Image: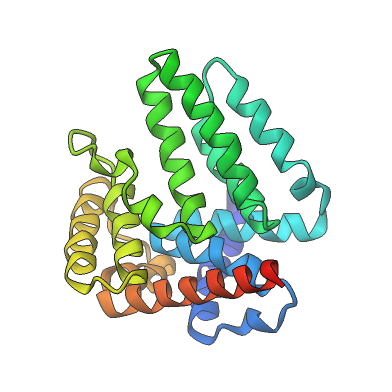
Amino acid sequence: MAVTATPVVIFASFYVAWAYTSRAWRKHKNHGVLTRSMSVGVLHGGNLALERLIDYHHARADETSLASAEIELKDLLQEAHPDFKTLQRTVAKLEMSGKEAEAVTILEKALEKAQNENKQHEAYEIQMLREEMLIYKGDFEKALHCKCLDEEDISDARRPLYKAIINVILEQPKEAFSNWEQFNEMRSNFLWPPDQQDAQLYEVIDDFDKFVNVVNLLKRDIQETSKRKNK
């Protein structure tokens, strides 16, 4: 399986990078829904971007996977030991179907439960999931002041990444650059140098101007989605 899967991964890496250069998928009728998840996926790095791309194409082939994502999220959060990697992909499906507000509501109830039961790690991870959904929802100020972003004793590259994204959106260039630098430093401590097929994706992360460009595309997509919902 690994041999046959490798060309797909290589192709997908170049597809994501090319799409962000050309924005070719804007011709698709659901472009706003796709690009918000993909924007953050690209900013996270190659693996998550590819997962989001694969999930999106699976969802197009089987729309019931999006329709059932809300129930799936609730069920996953009820587990004694939630799988947060699976949860991250599930909340992304809710965003793809335009249900980020529903995701926030579900996650906030789960967060309250985890806090009441003194499950600190679980509460933190749920907050980070909610953080991404708040960004998609356009609640930038609320997202920026979430407690999870101030957990300095936890080494988590998502914290400076989400801060940098929000800083760019709120036009705070100094704070954006500082958090982007911290994100890259933390990421480099945990990841090997990218393979050749991932190089174009990592250019988006390693070059601040390209990072800002992707965030501005994300901001525009969030605004366009909000306008469509408010019509």
Choose between 137 and 89: the one closer to the eye. Answer: 137
What x and y, as percent, mark residue 117?
44, 13
Residue 209 drawn above or below residue 101:
below
Q: Is residue 56 visible?
A: yes
Q: Quadrant of the C terminus?
A: bottom right
Choose between 109 and 149: the one closer to the eye. Answer: 109
* Residue at figure coordinates x 59%, y 64% from the top left: 7
* Residue at figure coordinates x 46%, y 61% from the top left: 40
What x and y, as percent, mark residue 28?
72, 78
* Residue at figure coordinates x 52%, y 59% from the top left: 136
What x and y, as percent, mark residue 71?
73, 34
* Residue at figure coordinates x 48%, y 28% from the top left: 111
Quarter location, residue 79: top right
Quarter location, residue 163: bottom left
Colouring convention used in this rendered image of the protein: rainbow
What x and y, as percent, mark residue 32?
63, 71
Looking at the image, residue 149 sits to the left or right of residue 14; the answer is: left
